[in-house]
Image (cartoon, rainbow, N blue to C red):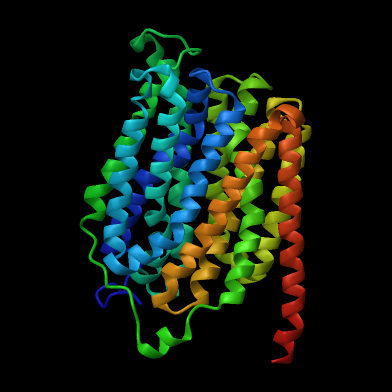
Amino acid sequence: MPTPSETRFLNRNFVLYMVGWACTATAYFGVSAVLFNLYLVRLGFGPEFIGLLSGAGQFVWALCALPAGVFSRRFGLRTSLLVSAAGQGLGMLALLCVESLPREIWPAWLLVTWMAQWALAAPLTVSGAPLLMQVTPLPYRRQAFTAQAIVMGIVAFLGSLLAGHLPGWLSGWVGAGLDAPAPYRTALFLIPVCYLLAFPLWSRLKLQPLGGGRAEAAEGPPRRLLLFVVGVVFLQTSAEGALRTFYNVYLDRVLLAPVDVIGQIGALAQVVAIATALAIPRILGRLGNTLTLCVTSLGAALAMIAIARATSVPVAGGAFVAAMALMGIGSQARQLFSQELVAPEHRTQISATNSLGVGLGWATMSGVAGLLVNSLGYTGVFGIGAILAFGAAATLFGFSRRRAPAASAT
């Protein structure tokens, strides 16, 4: 429940969390999404290592999700956010020192520092949804998750647009062309700055301890439904993982898109995500959580088929924009659906379970796709992602059909 002083939607805790969230979303969904893999390519790494690195980080994040839930319950949501922001910022600073080391240890250094960042991302991803549920009055909770999606879309748009131009702007200053890693490395220093900016904001949060009454605690979370959710989330995010990991490399190496165009496509995807986020409360109210997840999975599968068959940048870009918008709606629907399933003291557990499914899905597809890209090509990898998204849609449709007779019977 919200604290007694937090009866307004735009209360102090909500604003502090959102501004800090804007900083971290700029770092990951804006700058890193556009530039990090391109930096790895300029360091001389191919899709196999990029897939391994991405999958290893996301697998560690999945493994740390449940312990992060325990940590958040033990030490509080505020502490979890602070540990995550500081840890991710310092971890990225360490990663960007890789070129000062002997080249033979570059892969190991990148793996260790990248996995450390993902491990420290777990407390943030586990704590965010329960925090929103706590600081937002009940009538405004759908609007709160919509606001988070809109904020993410705005800052990711600005971050993507900026990231697409930064290497070109910085190339003259660092004395290196766009085929060298230096302009990308310099631009990526914006990431730790963004994470560390969130720290003083979140340090001012005043939150209630997690927990509830004995009767609520005895009920426990619905474990069978949690297992079902993990499975569906795994299918959905496996498809998403293939797209997020390799889309910019595909544009760069196969379709030969300029870096600024890649950034502009990412920025456009965020603009469309903002527009669709405004419709999330209405969509959820009309379709419900389960059918919304089914429809977004089906749409994402069709978009990935279009990307797999694309031979031009505009077609691939349009399909990517559509896929990101649909996946954004699905992500918000998953969070709100899972949080409303359980009592307040179990919200970190269900959030951790959701993060577990996301992490396993991203990690599995990123790692497998990195191994398959040489034999199947990027077209084959995106095709596999479409099949997984179709699987998620079919599973959710079957689930909604089975629940319909039970609901009418009651």
- Percent x, y for residue 143? 46, 64
Point 76% across, 26% down: residue: 311
Residue 204: x %, y % from top left: 20, 57
Can residue 142 be seen in the rendering of this structure? no
Q: Depth check: 109 or 394 in front?
A: 109
| Residue at screen point 40% across, 30% down | 109
Quick one: 296 or 46, which is closer to the camera? 46
Displayed quadrant of residue 26: top left
Quadrant in the picture for residue 320: top right
State whether residue 143 appears in this view.
yes
Q: Position of residue 54 (x, y in %)?
A: 53, 38
Q: Residue at x 61, y 76 (%)?
A: 224
Q: Is residue 338 left or right of residue 302?
A: left
**Where is residue 256 drawn, in percent x and y?**
65, 18
Image quarter in which the N terminus is found: bottom left
Q: Is residue 211 above or below residue 96?
A: below
- Residue sitting at x 41%, y 48%: 119
* Residue 191 vertical position relative to residue 337 in the rendered view, above or below: above
Quadrant placement of the C terminus: bottom right
